[in-house]
Amino acid sequence: MADVTTMNNCSKDGGATEAVTNNDCTINGTGKDIIKVTVKKANVKDPEIFSCLLQPASSDSDLDSIGVRRFLLARKAESGVHRRLDWRCNGKGYVAYRNYIRRPRNWENSQIPSYPSTPGNSGRWMLTSSPLSRLSEVESWSSSKDLRSGALASNHRTSFSSSISDSDRPHGQGVEPAYSFVGMHCIFDQCKSAVTVLKFGHMSSDLLAYGASDGTLTVCNVSDPPTVINQLKGHSKDVTDFDFSSNNQYIASSAADKTVRVWELSKGLCIRVIYGVSPQLCIRFHPVNNNFLSVGNANKEITVFNFSTGRVIAKSIFDSEVTSMDHDHTGHLIFCGDAQGCIYSVTMDSHTGALSRSHRYRSSSKQKFPITTVQYRSFSLLAGGPVLLTCTKDGSLSFFSVALEVQGYLTLRCSLKLTPRIHSIRASFCPLLSLNKGEYIVAGSEDSNVYFYDLTRPKHTCVNKLQGHRFPVLVVAWNHGENFLASADLYGVVIVWKRAKTSYKGNI
């Protein structure tokens, strides 16, 4: 690129300023003399250097001071040129550049595999060859040796956010092809109270279970003809969560009656009761060692139980009630959310069950709401690795990339603010289109509809909705085959929606 030379009058008596892009930097005089400033990197042509350098001089200003100031401004702008060019080559704007220059030192050597977003530009993700990205607001209990850098400081997050109403209609070119449904496959209305949790069995397309606020657990088969297999009764208060064992032979449930119950599905019997001192709010089987059962409670704890004996193996204390949780696919990490909106990464020993807190993500929002959903997925093409979805009671959806090699370090990628709500409504990944262009989420709403969102769209985020419930939809769940979507509402009605067959090339 050719050198650039600019001349400009800087005083009444004809003083001029000359800026030449070259490989030296000298100052020949100030005031009435010629100021010659040369900037390194001859192949750089950036008019912003001259906007800093050629400051207008007033009639009463000190010409010596002006000359020195111009020289210093040119030197200051030199490093900024290089940084701005790094971002311009990727089509990014000022906000991305500002986030870049505020990054922690030695971030290049920390080897955290995350990718920067473009909050101030289009809101869409742009993968770059550079490993640099902004850190989320986190507090870490890990040693600097584990993080490879001691400078992982708290910073403002890099994300775009969007705020929409649940009643917004889908925009664009119509419904996403792979999210077309032929209608209702079946309806279960045996339950007469609010359904609080809903799940399909592991690696199962037909086995469905849901827990309710009356303490019952209902197990169904959605294949033709749809049938209710068992109704498990034992809890005296709301079923807050449950989980299938890896072989779907057992269900472990937690409830507000301060108990954890283990059920054998083939017999429909409760084979073990574990009593606690506070409401048990969330529960998960270990994905590798099913003898470990992790339970979060209102006593600010996660407790690991031995499934066979019911004895406590390990505990970890948190800052508030642990309201939701999920394991990663390896079983070495637990991700959990609390009643103050914080998200924790917790390491777990698969052999001993020992727990150790690693990181904490704090929302920048002044108002704190409980986390209702924490869902992990092992891979997203858009994020280039594992991801985590969270949802708060006020309707805030957040999407994180996960650095497994840094003990579950979270980087916020995008967020979506829905209409504030009264009830605890859960959200779920849409696995069908996760390897295509967008990052799709499905969630219920208080207007009785089921909505599909693309988190990567800054506007018109809703891509489809399902209408059929008469009351607020609290929970949703996909089956393993991804051909059924189940949703349940405040009055106990569970609808299983059948997805239309499509030749969409992005399907898996």
Image (cartoon, rainbow, N blue to C red):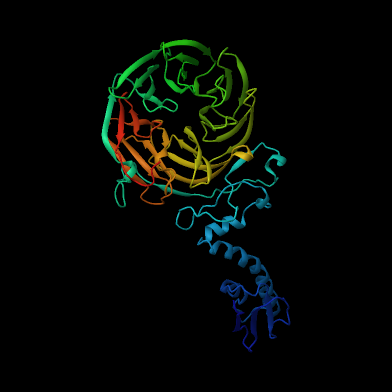
Position of the C terminus, as image quadrant, is top left
Give above or below for 9 relative to 281.
Answer: below
What is the quadrant of residue 335 in the picture?
top right
Position of the N terminus, as image quadrant, is bottom right
**Label total for image:** 0
Q: Nearer the viewer, residue 291 or 42?
A: 291
Q: Nearer the viewer, residue 441 or 504?
A: 504
Is residue 316 visible in the rendered image? The answer is yes
Please give left or right for residue 54 compared with residue 259 in the image: right
Give above or below for 220 relative to 378.
Answer: above
What is the quadrant of residue 475 in the picture?
top left
Please give left or right for residue 83 compared with residue 504 in the image: right
Is residue 430 visible in the rendered image? The answer is no
What is the quadrant of residue 145 in the picture?
top right
Residue 377 image point, x, y percent: 49, 37
Give above or below for 312 relative to 157.
Answer: above
Residue 470 image point, x, y percent: 26, 30
Please give left or right for residue 66 compared with residue 167 in the image: right
Q: Residue at x 42, y 38 (%)?
A: 431
Residue 81 image point, x, y percent: 61, 67
Residue 503 image point, x, y percent: 32, 44
Please give left or right for residue 249 compared with residue 148 in the image: left
